[in-house]
Image: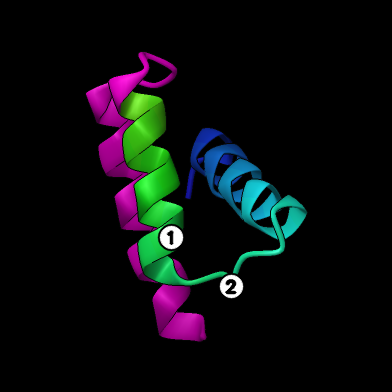
Amino acid sequence: MSSNAEWYIGHALVELLEQERMVSLFSVIDILERRLQDGNSSRDEFMDILEAIEKLRRYA
């Protein structure tokens, strides 16, 4: 997992926790999709992040 992907996942989790929302895979992906649409990340980074999430799910 790239450190960049870890940063984006961590950022999404912190955003959810600050809003006191339930953290779920779907809510993390929603935030990541918004960052992609806002131009805050590239499609390649987004795909790296999804791959990293898939790897993390195996450990959960």
> Residue 26: image x %, image y %?
36, 65
Residue at 63 percent of width and 55 percent of height: 16
Q: Is residue 50 magenta?
A: yes
Amino acid type of the residue tagged 2 in the rendering? Met
User: Crowding at label 2, few (<14), some or many (≥20) Cα neighbours within 10 Å?
Assistant: few
Please provide percent x and percent y for residue 6: 57, 46
Colouring style: rainbow
What span is colored magenta in the figure?
37-60
The image shows residue 19 at horizontal and vertical percentages of 69, 53
Q: Residues within 10 Å of mark 1 (few under 14, many from 20)?
A: some
Marks counted in the figure total 2
Position of 31 with respect to 36 (left or right) is right
- Real-space Cα distance between discs 1 and 2? 8 Å
Could you tell me which residue is drawn at 56 percent across and 69 percent down?
Answer: 23
Question: Which secondary structure type mostly characterizes the magenta part of the structure?
Answer: helix
In the image, residue 37 sits, relative to residue 60, either above or below, namely above
User: Within the magenta stretch, is there residue 29?
Assistant: no
Q: Residue at x 37, y 18 (%)?
A: 38
Query: Which element is circle 2 on?
Result: loop
Q: Which residue is mark 2?
A: 22
Amino acid type indicated by mark 1: Ser
Q: Looking at the image, is mark 1 or mark 2 earlier in the sequence?
A: 2
- Residue extending farthest to the top is 39
Residue shown at the point (70%, 50%) measured from the top left: 14
Work out whether 5 lies above or below 30: above
Q: What residue occupies the far right of the structure in this picture?
A: 18
Asked if disc 1 and disc 2 are in contact, CB closer than 8 Å, the reply is yes
Instruction: Give the side of residue 51 with respect to residue 2, left or right.
Output: left
46, 2: nearer the viewer: 46
Residue picked out by circle 1:
27
In this image, 44 relative to 53: left or right?
A: left
Secondary structure at numbered mark 1: helix
